[in-house]
Amino acid sequence: MVIKNYKDLAVWQKGRILVKLVYQLTKHFPKEEIYGLTSQLRRSVVSVPSNIAEGHSRSGTKDFIQFISIGSLAEVETQIILAEDLEYVASAHTESLYKNIQELQRMLHALRSSLKDKL
């Protein structure tokens, strides 16, 4: 199957879901964090589907591979852990986020491997 549009990619769709979950979570962070952890976490998570879209729109497979943002997911995970450490969120509220992050990491690794095989 040929993917004509980045919106057809399941990994991009999963990234959008994670963005929504993180925005819902950060709505409840303290107001003094709006320019701190809230902003950083939101920027990190938004970069995941954004980079997939940008990479897909590039002219070559090598460029696409470079835009697969597994590192941004590690940032998101770390920032959620920090939010728990700072008691901005209970671990009961982050379990589904971690599952989504892990699934998205697997999907990104698979996409990267698939693209490398085409080189």
Image (cartoon, rainbow, N blue to C red):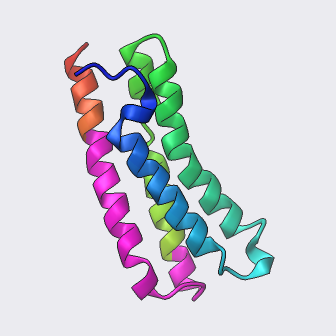
Q: Is residue 106 left or right of residue 13?
A: left
Q: Is residue 53 above or below residue 40?
A: above
Residue at position x 50%, y 20% in the image: 57
Please give the name of the residue rendered at 23% of the width and 15% of the height, measured from the top-left corner: 118
The C terminus sits in image quarter: top left
Q: Is residue 95 magenta?
A: yes
The residue depicted at 70 percent of the width and 61 percent of the height is 39
> Residue 68 in magenta?
no
Provide the major secondary structure of the magenta segment.
helix
Q: In the picture provided, is 31 more to the left or to the right than 41?
A: right
In this view of the protein, can residue 70 be seen by the observer?
no
Report the number of numbered marks. Answer: 0
Name the spot of residue 85 as percent of width and height, x first.
53, 84
On screen, 79 above or below 75?
below
Asked where in the image residue 37 lies, by quadrant, the reply is bottom right
Q: Is residue 8 above or below residue 22?
A: above
Is residue 71 visible from the viewing direction of this image?
Answer: yes
The reply, left or right, for residue 95 in relation to residue 106 is right
Image quarter for residue 94? bottom left
Quadrant where the N terminus sits is top left
- Magenta residue span: 82-109
Q: Position of residue 74 (x, y in %)?
A: 44, 56
Residue for point 55% across, 38% down: 50
Residue 24 on image: x %, y %: 58, 71
User: Relative to the observer, which residue lies in front, 75 or 89?
Assistant: 89
* Residue 13 percent across, percent down from the top left: 41, 45
